[in-house]
Image: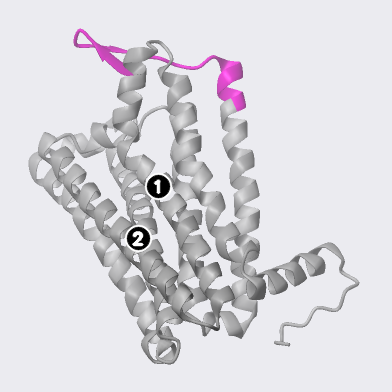
Amino acid sequence: MNSTGGQQLLIRDTFTTAVIKNLTVVLVWFLLSYINGSVVATFFRHQIFYEDPRYILFIHMVINDAVQLTVTIALFLVSYILYTISVGVCCFFMLVAVFTTRSTPVNLAGMAIERYIAICYPLRHSQICTVRRAYMLIAAIWFISVVPDITDLFMTLSTEPLSFFQSNVFCLRQNVFKDPVLLYKRQTFDGIYFLLVFLTLLCTYLRIVCAARALSTEKTSAKRATSTILLHGVQLLMCMLSYVSPSVEGVLNIIFPGRILEMRFANYLIVYILPRFLSPIIYGVRDKKFRKYLRRYFVCRIDTRVECKDGED
């Protein structure tokens, strides 16, 4: 929906285009849900993983991404099927999507720090990175992710009448949290988040590279750690696209007028869908230990004649 000359113009896809788009996102959701479900099942079937802080942080990010993907796809489907929904319902889904989107970069920073400690302080790693502290870190991640955006809801509750939350809107953030102050606050927090997480990844990467050069042993693990943090950096940049995508979308709309629906769909796939493929790949496929058990899980699912044991090797 665009606004021109104060009038609301309804822009909708053709029936065929709408079916193709919705079918695409549903198929992607099924594929990613199957991958994420397999990763989560592998994690919980083997005690070796849920007693390791590294894999606890990893599975937290996988579950977080799965929730974020499900909520955003649900909103996508609702935008075509119902078009408008209650402001109260929209607030709930919108905040869940925002919380899970914001927590991913912070989780990446925590995982990078864990790899830094494992490589640079291997003798103290088991003392510093404990299961209890991993769960404390997850709690801190959610606190950091929730507090800045929950204030948007409180400010909206204090400025909008009750009838506003009973009305129907097209579920976009700017249609619910309309105060311009909230936009400036969100941009400020987004900039701070990006800067802090980027500096964390950069510092840990440089320190691990320096440690790898100094160590005569563990060079292989140090090299894998630097590669992992580089992948975290790529994932961070892709996640951060969600913070600049509204501005980019506005510029592209000026350059290519009349293509807003196509650009919005492409933006949705690149910004919200594609980064969710990286989490299972970084640990689920690249990590030798996890890959061994994940392969066993798939073999057991495909060939029921194979005897599968949940115990450790």
Residue drawn at (33%, 49%), measured in percent from left and top? Answer: 98
Instruction: Please say whether residue 309 is one of the residues in the magenta stretch.
Output: no
Front position in the image: 49 or 81: 49
Q: Which residue is mark 1?
A: 237
Horizontal and vertical percent position of residue 72: 44, 43
Q: Which residue is mark 2?
A: 202
Tell me if I can see residue 201 in this picture.
yes
Q: Is residue 88 left or right of residue 273?
A: left
Residue drawn at (52%, 43%), measured in percent from left and top? Answer: 274
Q: Is residue 144 left or right of residue 253?
A: left
Horizontal and vertical percent position of residue 62: 51, 61
Of badges 2 and 1, nearer the viewer stands 2
Amino acid of disc 1: Leu
Front position in the image: 26 or 281: 281
Q: Quadrant of residue 232?
A: bottom left
- Pointer 2 or 1: first along the chain: 2
Q: Residues within 10 Å of mark 2 (few under 14, many from 20)?
A: some
Pick the quarter of the image with the N terminus.
top left
Horizontal and vertical percent position of residue 178: 17, 34
Tell me if I can see residue 82 in this picture.
no
Q: Quadrant of residue 104?
A: bottom left
Q: Secondary structure at mark 2?
A: helix
Amino acid of disc 2: Leu
Front position in the image: 243 or 154: 243
Front position in the image: 292 or 171: 292
Q: Residue furthest top?
A: 5
- The number of numbered badges drawn on the structure is 2
Q: Secondary structure at mark 1?
A: helix
The magenta segment is: 1-20
Horizontal and vertical percent position of residue 149: 22, 52
Q: Are marks 2 and 1 in contact (CB under 8 Å)?
A: no
